[in-house]
Image (cartoon, rainbow, N blue to C red):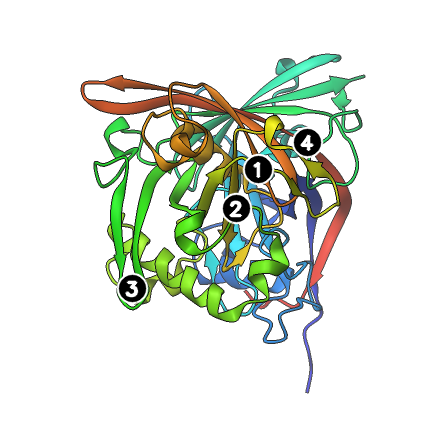
Amino acid sequence: MAFAPQIKIPATYMRGGTSKGVFFRLEDLPEAARVPGPARDALLMRVIGSPDPYGKQIDGMGGATSSTSKTVIIGRATKPDHDVDYLFGQVAIDKAFVDWSGNCGNLSAAVGPFAIAAGLVDPARLPRDGMATIRIWQANIGKTIIAHVPMTGGAVQETGDFELDGVTFPAAEIQLEFMDPAEDGDGGALFPTGHLVDDLVVPGIGGFKATMINSGIPTIFLEAEALGYSGTELQDDINNDASALEKLETIRAHGALRMGLIESLAQAASRQHTPKLAFVARARDYRASSGKEIKAGDIDLLVRAMSMGKLHHAMMGTASVAIGTAAAVPGTLVNLAAGGGAREAVTFGHPSGTLRVGAKAERHGGAWVVSKAIMSRSARVLMSGQVHLPFAG
């Protein structure tokens, strides 16, 4: 029996924030994978090494965590006044699907550097030295992200002294502006239920106060205490508890239904990337996963978030946008955990350390709107060349 040889596709393996993934230029993909559909999903799953019943992704580029099972496709801009289109695919680890329902805020930091290096940005717009401003169209959710990318000697500057908790080594700082981050662009949809705090009843588990918000990524915020947590938990405290994971996923599914993101609870299983489930608590001292001591006086609140069914090792970038936005609206659970009142920025504690995020929320015509959220990340190329894979598409 004859077997076809592997195909080779130009690709770049990049870290962006506390995530990493495989980046492709749209034009480099096989023709069948240049459009949405089964062929594209099959290719990306094979690149990453999914579905893997062993949960290791040994036969692919994935790292067997939600933070490392990611793919990005960058194309030439289709929107006026933008430099590139950015499409993110979250690849499930042990199941055969790619979730296209949301953005990855962490990998957003790598989009500008990749686009510049890949020749997708007009060279006339790039300074030899200084800051390049790259306007990115986030195609998953139809939003604009502005990335401020440092340049040195005509190339992206990757090294620097910016430190990001959850990332071992320092690098160059990249500031991101998430413009009009409410999911559908309508300020009235910032809170899809119309309330800052809802009563979320989950049969068989109980009732919870919940802030459900569409900003950066749809997110359900709960109070840590209501779940029996302190807000200082690290990954092993939750990820080694199968009953806790099942409980949290059930709550997430009911929240997704309440937010109108799914029509039935059964659909939550194929929509793992969104919404996110997070829980908040007032600031207190704790020890981060690196051993670093985090003092209550250095943070405004504690936040822990679930990603693809597991507690995230740090904080998703899009969830950080949701945190910043919710904190800026007086009366949300996030705002109350931070002490209440008006604020345009918060520093929150997560399992790997701390992060500061800013957002400006205003009330217009009875509805809360947010013009943009701002945070800093870093990014760098880990490997560039070609990925090899069997693909019959």
Q: Amino acid at mark 3?
A: Leu
Give whichever of discs 4 and 3 has the lower sequence position: 3
Q: Quadrant of the C terminus?
A: bottom right
- The residue located at (27%, 29%) in the rendering is 186
Determine the secondary structure under disc 1.
loop
Name which of mark 3 and mark 1 comes first in the sequence. Answer: 3
Tell me the mark number nearer the camera, choosing from 3 and 1. Answer: 1
Q: Is residue 26 visible?
A: no
Q: Residues within 10 Å of mark 1 (few under 14, many from 20)?
A: some
Measure the C-alpha gap from mark 3 to mark 1: 35 Å
Camera-near label (3 vs 2) is: 2
Q: Position of residue 365 (x, y in %)?
A: 18, 18
Q: Secondary structure at mark 4?
A: loop
Q: Secondary structure beneath disc 2?
A: loop
Residue to which mark 1 is pinned? 284
- The residue carrying pointer 4 sits among few (fewer than 14), some (14 to 19) or many (20 or more) residues within 10 Å by Cα, namely many
Q: Which residue is mark 2?
A: 231
Q: Which residue is mark 3?
A: 265
Q: Are marks 4 and 1 in contact (CB under 8 Å)?
A: no
Three-letter amino acid code of the residue under disc 1: Arg
Alpha-carbon span between mark 4 and mark 1: 27 Å
In this figure, which residue is indicated by the disc labeled 4?
Answer: 378
Residue 190 against residue 224 in the figure, above or below: above
In the picture, residue 80 is in which quadrant? top left
Query: Does the CB distance between marks 2 and 1 fall below 8 Å?
Result: yes
Alpha-carbon neighbours of circle 3 within 10 Å: few (<14), some, or many (≥20)?
A: some
